[in-house]
Image (cartoon, helix red, strand yellow):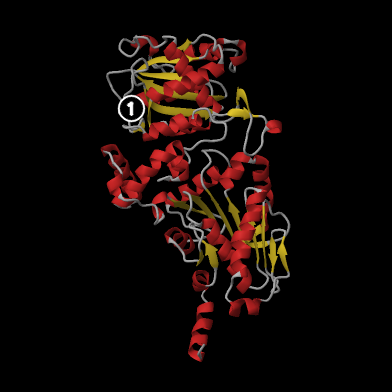
Amino acid sequence: MTKKEQAQLLENLRDWRWRLNHLYKIVDEQGREITFKENKAQSYVLDNIHWLSLILKSRQHGITTLLCLVMLDRAIFNPNTHCGFVAHGLEEAKKIFRTKIKFPFDRLPKNISSVIGKPIKDDAGTLELSNGSSITVATSLRSGSFQWVHISEYGKICAKYPERAREVRAGTMETVHQGCYLTIESTAEGPEGDFYERCKEAEALQRQGKKLGPMDYKFFFLPWYLKESNSSDPQYVEITPDDEKYFAKIEAENGVTLTPEQKAWYVAKAGSAKTEMMQEHPSTSDEAFSTSVEGAYWAAEIQSLYRRKPPQITKLIHDPSLPVHTVHDPGYHWAIWFVQDPDGVYPKFLRYIEDIGHGVEYYAEMLDRLADEYGWRYGKHIAPVDVDNNGQRQVGGDTIFERGQQNGLYFEQMEVVEDSNDLIQEARVALNTYFFDEDGCKDGIKSLTSFKRQKIKGMSTEKKPVFREKYEHNWASHGATAFYHFVKARRDGYFYGASYDVPEQQHFVRSPGMF
């Protein structure tokens, strides 16, 4: 090597992005040993990295590989730098350490490795270097301080291992001090858990255009079309007009132009991936979080509604000739579905609302406001039989049913729910014919997607969970209960004829003193 070449090499070595793309060997998707080069998604992340970053992604963008190499490079070229990688399982941690830390380290160019020298420690998930730096790969990090921590598949950790998720929140995340880096990435595991909540908060900040401080999370979403290899020959794929409508919507919402090859890949992949498509290869963050949670009753059916032709979760238009009926799950945590044409072939759910800690008066007034705002004419207000029992007495000694009458909200009580498991199964079948407004019912759809069985922890393994035939009573169960109340009311004829001939005086919601 000439002096000029040596000088150029030394200059290049000062640039960490140059080092990243020239020094490290990886194994690609075809099993070949190659020199790492950033792809489109990886460059996007590195160009925009923040101290705290949340990365919601579709599959196989190489984010784990990227951040392992970034941390390895930092440890090698910055003395006393400590990096930590949290994997979602012990076997995954061992594999990541072996293939994404040790493999590229052991294959560094000789002129680099000779300067670094042999590591002090390179087993049990830790690579410790003679310059005082180290990288640890484990399922949790509690002791010590780290300059960079990456948490992989945090959505999966939150969904499958809630106790470990609490440990990661309380332990691992606290090892990263202000001014250091914490990156969290995952595919989605349904609309619940700490990863979901953090992503939604960070995405809200992004949409507001807020300038981020060192304690704010920056949100990244990596859709399927960022991956260059997600393309296929269009001549072998039939792209329908409904497919084109979907692609047009994605292009308009995200400011992108999809190639014919990308569209062909997506349609072909959707045919084999079926209900997993939105989880594995989402086009939007909302799609990603519409995916199934472990033990969910209706998640697959909800996903299929998005992909129906025409889609059954879409923009709906209120029909002023028909009344709007409401179905309630009342109590401290109150859930309401608003539906038109309940006896028709395709009932239309226009809106879903839930709230906590309010009395009947609050909901009566709220229904009045919605009627004025949207021009709705109410039909029946369906509620379970227990709205008129002693357990539902409000302040002052009145039941919900009685207090509703005092405020112009006349409930029609259903008969006793015979077996919630039977109704849950009945609702699964009925979902195929229902339409939902994608904006007005957004929170309700999230509840339906997340409604799940109780898991028997002592009998479950990671690969084979065991569930009780009983639903888990949590935030999602209120909207889901109101929903299967609708299914029962429809089946039992509570709406019969109501879509066309509703006694307006009897069922119109009136605020106190309105008449």
Q: Position of residue 400 (x, y in %)?
A: 54, 15
Packing grade of label 1 (10 A; few <14, some 14-19, many >=20) is: few
In the picture, the quarter occupied by the C terminus is top left
Q: Position of residue 152 (x, y in %)?
A: 58, 52
- Left or right: 25 as drawn, with respect to 223: right
Q: Which residue is mark 1?
A: 374
Q: Position of residue 487 (x, y in %)?
A: 45, 17
Which residue shows up at 61% across the image and 68% down it?
Answer: 105
Amino acid type at image mark 1 = Tyr
Which residue shows up at 47% across the image and 32% down it?
Answer: 300
Question: Looking at this view, is 257 or 396 the one in front?
Answer: 257
Q: Secondary structure at mark 1?
A: helix
Which residue shows up at 64% across the image and 48% down it?
Answer: 89
How many circles with numbers are drawn on the protein?
Answer: 1
Which residue shows up at 49% across the image and 10% down it?
Answer: 414
Question: Looking at this view, is 70 or 410 the one in front?
Answer: 70
Any part of residue 408 in sight? no
Q: Position of residue 231 (x, y in %)?
A: 36, 52
Furthest residue in direction bottom, as rendered: 3
Q: Is residue 134 above or below residue 300?
A: below
Any part of residue 268 in sight? yes
